[in-house]
Amino acid sequence: MERREQITVIALVFLMLFTGTVNTIATKYQDIVCVEYDDDGVTCKRRFKHFVVQSAEMFLGEILCLLPALVGVIYRWLKNNFGSPKAPKDGVSWRTMGMAAASFAVPAFCDISGTTMLNVGIFYTYPSVYQMLRGTVVFFAGIFTIVLLGRQLSKDQWLALFLIVIGAGIVGSVSVLPIGSKHNNGKVIGASNPLLGNILVICAQLAAAFQFIIEEKYLSRYKVPPNVAVGLEGFWGFLTTMTALPLLAKIKDAQGQPFDDLPQAIHEIKQNRTLMIATLGSIFSIAFFNFFGITLTKRLSGAARATIDACRTIFVWIYSVNVGWEEKSWVKNMLQIFGFMVLVSGTSLFNGLLTSRKKKKIQEAKDNQLGEETPLITSPSPGMSLQFNRKYISNTMARSFRLGRSLFSSPSSSFTDMDKGDANSNEEPLLTAGSVDSTAFADDMVSGEMDLQ
């Protein structure tokens, strides 16, 4: 990797972590802002509590991902002919493009339910626990892969799912149980009902995993760029939430308050400058987070992006502890860190960034064998095509050697090397059909996370 490329990747990693951290903190900050006080002017009577409005904010940020694609479409249309638009030159009709745009309404509905539950969950639980428990989406996606897609998981991936369950159990239990609990001045403002919040966050990951499965189907069918897919889901999500908000204003809770009220939310945002800053920060941070995440996925991989994104939990946790959103308990914090490490290990193992020791030795042996054979095919005889697979080349060289004449001549080749090639000519390919499916699913599943906050 060139130096300029390294600098670019480092910058993308930093910007992705920064915008992702800002998004989580800004969303939590909206939840703790007091919008109405008692007569004494000190006691908070009501906090900013508009979960569907917050979902609309996120979808509005996702719509911004459509701007680059929209500018490109307008530019090409103006450049071709200043009249009515024609079908693209690549043969894709406008009808097909319309069907592709409409199809992303289905995962958008999953995104709406998942995002709303996330907004309710972070309202009641700690922001760091909220961020950690979002890693359970890998577990549900793996289960849906078996049940809905009929795919098989490797032993490493099953071990990864087990680690994810254990890690989530540790993180969730520590946030609920009074383990070494020491509140800051008798009160922690970051979580009013951690158990309810944790359950809602995990349920939201169930909806998100189902969303990823649907996205994988439509992305492969219509070949839609990831940023366009995010923007389309943002469009459908924003349209649906704006339609539902007037109806939700008619639904009252036990205290007579509406479930959500858009005019009231707008009024509260206008009256509170810090709340307005947090709202704008939430909208633009999710837009830039998706943009940097997509760009990083193209340069590295979806698995690498998932691991990098998990690191923002550390920054969210550090900030939350310093501002009093988390309990300052040494025992509880250490257990949370341990559970978080188990979660990250499970996610990395599922995405192929970590492998078991036995599998690693087998892969190294195959890589060494491949390295021995590679120089033999660098100078093919005239008319010989290079479009052979590895197994066919090995068998051909073995037969040619037994006849006393090699099809691929190399001055540095020795009889010993040829014997090795003959002995291993019946090896299985490095990538089987099952492993390709698992790897492709991991990358697609991780790329689908960008659709969330």
Image (cartoon, rainbow, N blue to C red):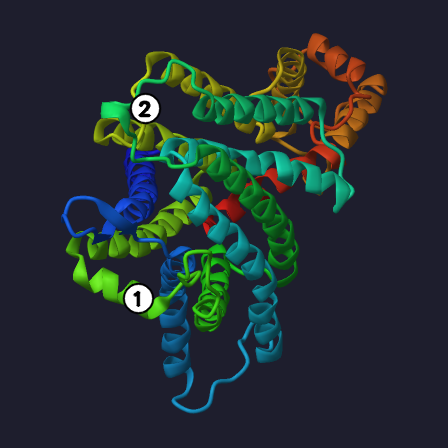
Residue at image x 24%, y 61%? 268
Horizontally, residue 170 falls left or right of residue 431, namely left
Q: Is residue 278 above or below residue 197?
A: below
Residue at 66% in and 14% down: 365
Residue 266 x, y percent position in the rendering? 28, 66
Q: Which mark is residue 327?
A: 2
Which of these two is toward me, 411 or 1? 1
Q: 34 above or below 151?
A: below
398 versus 274 height, above or below: above
**Residue density around tag 2, few if under 14, some if 14–19, many if 20 or more, within 10 Å:** many
* Labels in figure, total: 2
Instruction: List the single residue furthest toward the front.
Output: 39
Left or right of 26 on screen, residue 433: right
Q: What separation in Å lies between label 1 and label 2 (alpha carbons)?
A: 32 Å
Picture disc at residue 423: none
Place residue 147 in its image quadrant: top right
Q: Nearer the viewer, residue 5 or 369?
A: 5
Residue at 35% across / 71% down in the picture?
Answer: 71
- The residue pinned by badge 1 equals 264
Q: Position of residue 273 (x, y in %)?
A: 16, 56
Q: Quadrant of residue 145?
A: top right
Q: Nearer the viewer, residue 251 or 53?
A: 251
Q: Residue type at mark 2?
A: Glu
Disc 2 element: loop
Q: Nearer the viewer, residue 22 or 381?
A: 22
Give how far across and how far down residue 181 sits, in percent.
Answer: 36, 18
